[in-house]
Image: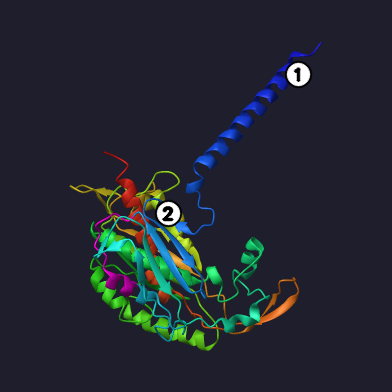
């Protein structure tokens, strides 16, 4: 006679198996239903204000398709081009000497100077490729590059300037980000970023309510630091690193003013989480912190808490939260810092391996930035603008 305990276990296992099959069927059905929403290749960003970029460093062109931009937005093509000019290569002695005009071409979505509500397609032709500069590393993996990982993932890679993994792709983001800025301007939202560190050289804390003045100071020097004295020191240091055939990292700080309260979702799509993803998706980014950042871990709650001040519009005495609480904007300035590693390509011989796993040697060739942060400033702003534009549209659907 079967013991009651054994019968219970058998029945329990049968129920688990049945439930497991139901869960599997549920998951498969949801994947089928939402397959169009799954971004398998990772080339798109955003939900309602959504971009998809395409192209490679040494291909014919790069570009972006922006879907979800509301109709009727005034599109200033001169502004878009001015944003691209801040990112384009060959602009100074401390950037790559590749010469690209980065002239944007509008293929669709704009009519008589306004968005039509249909997908906006922007194309940026590549003009100054030198693919022969990369003939030496067809089967050799450059240290700290994406050479090996792309080969391992896809079984094929474009060795010419990194192909799709090249920061050349970010020009497309800047073009789309410029349109996001034009959208945010309708709501008075301002975004400003500048270089606050190169290597161990740090700019002093920068506090201003006049972002137009800050922008003028930033654009008055080639490193894009709003503190002139520190900027000169940074420029000299980057130039010396370049002459040594080496590279150096740095930091870009960003402030967002006049962001309305309520942007961001409370769980997985927290505003700071999406800003973090946006920044970490930029080439060479190795760190992101907002508000008090890592320094906040050394403080007590009595020090860190942002005390509210009485008034018609709630404000806080301090801003250790960085303008975001519970993943949702609180109306204070949003502040964050993005850290960039040194460019991996250096003009020195390095030990590495080839595709067969054998020891090899490689020497950097081609044209590369000795420090990416002077050109990364505008990319940081663009990605921040794309996040805010997306969340602004999403917030409109959250309440009556």
Look at the image and tell me in which quarter the C terminus lies. Answer: top left
Q: Is residue 190 visible?
A: no
Comparing 221 with 13, the one in front is: 13
Measured as percent of width and height from the top left, residue 18 is found at 64, 26
Look at the image and tell me in which quarter the N terminus lies. Answer: top right
Q: Secondary structure at mark 2?
A: helix
Q: Is residue 273 above or below residue 111?
A: above
Q: Is residue 334 above or below residue 141?
A: above
Q: Quadrant of residue 184?
A: bottom left
Q: Give neighbour class at mark 2: few <14, some 14-19, many 20+ (Cα, 10 Å).
A: many
Q: Is residue 160 above or below residue 150?
A: below
Outermost residue, bottom side: 243
Measured as percent of width and height from the top left, residue 37 is found at 47, 48
In percent of the image, x 37 and y 84: which residue is there? 232
Asked if labels 2 and 1 touch by Cβ distance under 8 angstroms, the answer is: no
**Label 1, label 2: how far apart the Cα atoms are:** 51 Å
User: What's the mark number on residue 6?
Assistant: 1
Outermost residue, left side: 312
User: What's the mark number on residue 274?
Assistant: 2
The magenta stretch spans residue 80:
yes
């Amino acid at each position: 006679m079967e013991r009651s305990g054994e019968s219970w276990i058998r029945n329990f296992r049968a129920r688990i198996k049945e439930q497991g099959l139901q869960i599997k069927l549920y998951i498969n059905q949801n994947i089928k239903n939402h397959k169009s929403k799954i971004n398998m290749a990772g080339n798109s960003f955003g939900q309602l204000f959504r971009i998809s970029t395409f192209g490679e460093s040494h291909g014919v062109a790069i570009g972006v398709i922006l879907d979800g931009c509301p109709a009727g937005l005034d599109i200033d093509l001169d502004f878009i081009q001015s944003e691209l000019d801040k990112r384009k290569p060959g602009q100074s002695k401390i950037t790559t000497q590749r010469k690209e005009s980065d002239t944007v071409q509008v293929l669709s979505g704009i009519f008589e100077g306004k968005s039509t509500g249909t997908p906006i397609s922007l194309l940026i032709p590549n003009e100054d490729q030198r693919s022969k500069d990369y003939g030496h590393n067809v089967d050799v993996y450059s240290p700290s590059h994406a050479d090996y990982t792309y080969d391992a993932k896809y079984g094929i890679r474009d060795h010419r300037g990194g192909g799709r993994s090249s920061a050349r792709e970010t020009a497309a983001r800047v073009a789309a980000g410029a349109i996001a800025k034009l959208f945010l301007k309708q709501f008075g939202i301002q975004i400003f970023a500048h270089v606050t560190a190169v290597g161990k050289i740090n700019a002093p804390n920068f506090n201003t309510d006049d972002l137009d003045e800050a922008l003028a100071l930033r654009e008055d020097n080639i490193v894009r630091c709003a503190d002139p004295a520190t900027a000169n020191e940074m420029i000299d240091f980057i130039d010396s690193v370049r002459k040594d055939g080496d590279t150096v990292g740095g930091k870009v700080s960003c402030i967002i003013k006049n962001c309305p309260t309520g942007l961001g979702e409370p769980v997985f799509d927290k505003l700071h989480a999406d800003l973090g993803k946006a920044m970490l998706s930029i080439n060479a980014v190795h760190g992101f912190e907002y508000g008090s950042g890592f320094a906040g871990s050394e403080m007590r709650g009595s020090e860190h808490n942002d005390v509210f001040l009485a008034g018609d519009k709630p404000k806080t005495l301090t801003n250790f939260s960085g303008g975001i609480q519970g993943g949702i904007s609180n109306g204070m300035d949003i502040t964050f810092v993005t850290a960039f590693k040194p460019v991996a390509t250096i003009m020195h011989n390095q030990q590495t391996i080839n595709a067969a796993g054998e020891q090899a040697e490689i020497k950097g060739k081609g044209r590369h930035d000795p420090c990416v942060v002077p050109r990364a400033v505008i990319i940081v702003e663009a990605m921040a603008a794309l996040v805010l534009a997306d969340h602004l549209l999403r917030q409109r659907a959250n309440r009556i």
